[in-house]
Image: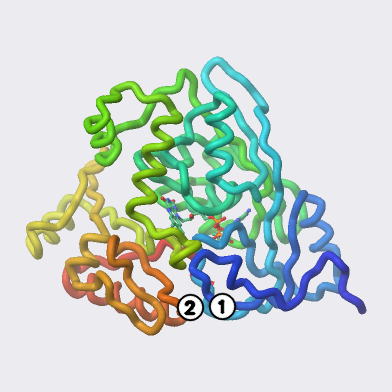
């Protein structure tokens, strides 16, 4: 049976993941509306199940070819759906570039996403990972989302409570992993807008510039400048951002780790737990600048693993495991990777 014209075959994914890792999708379908998902599920001639939902490929480590259908989400559209006294509710297509949405909402007078500027990837992946940066997490700006169930083809709407957001975590990494294509996300941008400036690097900007009441645009520009100075640009050096989550530990565990090294960087959390700086621990174990094959640890920030040229996914995974082992050996902490390994 001939394959439908909307199904692409043997597509290289190298340019579709920010690590620049080589892999091929046996089949790839681009989703621009919910109906495209149903068409895929109904098309028996495709003969392969959806295997990987792909956004901007900025949180992935591809270790092999994908022997199934890659569902590339390209749903577009941005609109104000509700203007309430307490919030603007803005809906964005899951295939939109996250940073473009941040910039457009500010330009349209709907501020609130500025601390999340310049995070690579798409709107649809933002709830999966509950993206966060500079003192704000998506969960705090989230209203609800629409998606399509990849088994039944039914449309679903999930509220914030249903998404079970946690630190870089959500229901889409657990019971719904690989089961739903997110097609639209509604963002709740609180009114009146107040800047979130509690993060150390933003406090520094306030002190340096003397601007104590910055506009959303100003915060956006500060965040972009801070990020550009410390994170590698994936278009010139392949990477997936922070490779490990910052571990959250109890007070007793934190005391134990400080006993191993009194300099360990740790931050008290509101619930009494402590967040440890994974990058600091990796650097303390001597990994900064080291390489395994084509995979390396970024010289400016040990939390970021990079593609030095021709890295393959297996080398990234081997490097990550070696780092995990040495951090465990020295601090008794098992680092958890942030990106999804495929
Ligand atoms: C330089 C750099 C800096 C970064 N900084 C940050 C940061 O500050 N904070 C942060 O939180 N993250 C950061 N990241 C990680 C990454 O940008 C985010 O996780 C982003 O949300 C991933 O989006 P994506 O579209 O590229 O997702 P992909 O990598 O394509 O996919 C990631 C996961 O989400 C799933 N997925 C993607 N789209 C959908 C969809 N529509 N429906 C259902 N599932 C979907 C995929 O199946 C996969 O499991 C950074 C990455 C880089 C390269």
Q: Nearer the viewer, residue 185 or 225?
A: 225
- Which quarter of the figure has residue 110? top right
* In-image side of 51 versus 299 (left or right): right
Residue depicted at x 63% and y 47%: 96
Report how far apart the C-alphas of labels 1 and 2 lie in the structure: 8 Å
Q: Residues within 10 Å of mark 2 (few under 14, many from 20)?
A: many
**Residue 336: image x %, image y %?**
36, 64
User: Ligand 1: does it lie within 8 Å of the C-beta at label 1?
Assistant: no
Residue depicted at x 52% and y 71%: 20
The residue wearing badge 1 is: 22
* In-image side of 25 versus 330 (left or right): right
Q: Residues within 10 Å of mark 1 (few under 14, many from 20)?
A: many
Q: Secondary structure at mark 2?
A: helix
Looking at the rendering, in which quadrant would you find the C terminus? bottom right
Front of the two marks 1 and 2:
1
Residue depicted at x 70% and y 53%: 74
Q: Secondary structure at mark 1?
A: loop
* In-image side of 131 versus 332 (left or right): right
Instruction: Name the residue at the bottom extreme.
Output: 293
The residue wearing badge 2 is: 313
Residue depicted at x 55% and y 24%: 109
């Amino acid at each position: 049976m001939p394959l439908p014209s909307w199904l692409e075959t043997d597509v290289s994914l190298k340019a579709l993941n920010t690590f620049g890792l080589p892999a091929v999708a046996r089949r790839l379908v681009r989703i621009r509306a919910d109906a495209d998902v149903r068409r895929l599920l109904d098309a028996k001639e495709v003969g392969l199940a959806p295997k990987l939902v792909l956004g901007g490929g900025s949180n992935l480590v591809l270790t092999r070819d994908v022997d199934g259908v890659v569902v590339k989400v390209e749903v577009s559209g941005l609109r104000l759906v509700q203007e309430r006294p307490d919030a603007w509710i803005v809906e964005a297509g899951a295939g939109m570039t996250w940073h473009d949405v941040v910039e457009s909402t500010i330009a349209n007078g709907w501020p609130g996403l500025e601390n999340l500027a310049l995070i690579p990837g798409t709107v649809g992946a933002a709830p999966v990972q509950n993206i966060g940066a500079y003192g704000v997490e998506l969960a705090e700006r989230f209203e609800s989302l629409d998606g399509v169930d990849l088994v039944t083809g039914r449309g679903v709407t999930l509220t914030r409570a249903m998404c079970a957001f946690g630190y870089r975590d959500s229901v889409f990494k657990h019971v719904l992993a690989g089961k739903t294509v997110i097609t639209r996300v509604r963002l709740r941008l609180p009114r009146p807008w107040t800047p979130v400036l509690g993060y150390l690097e933003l406090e520094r900007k306030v002190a340096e510039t003397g601007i104590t009441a910055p506009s959303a645009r100003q915060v956006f520009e500060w965040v972009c400048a801070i990020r550009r100075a410390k994170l590698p640009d994936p278009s010139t050096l392949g990477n997936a951002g922070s490779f490990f989550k910052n571990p959250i530990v109890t007070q007793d565990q934190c005391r134990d780790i400080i006993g191993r090294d009194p300099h360990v960087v740790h931050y008290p959390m509101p619930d009494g737990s402590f967040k440890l700086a994974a990058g600091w621990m990796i650097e303390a174990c001597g990994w900064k600048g080291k390489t395994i094959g084509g995979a390396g640890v970024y010289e400016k920030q040990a939390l970021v693993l990079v593609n030095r040229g021709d890295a393959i996914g297996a080398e990234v995974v081997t490097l990550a495991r070696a780092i995990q082992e040495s951090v465990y050996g020295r601090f008794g902490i098992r680092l958890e990777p942030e990106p999804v390994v495929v």
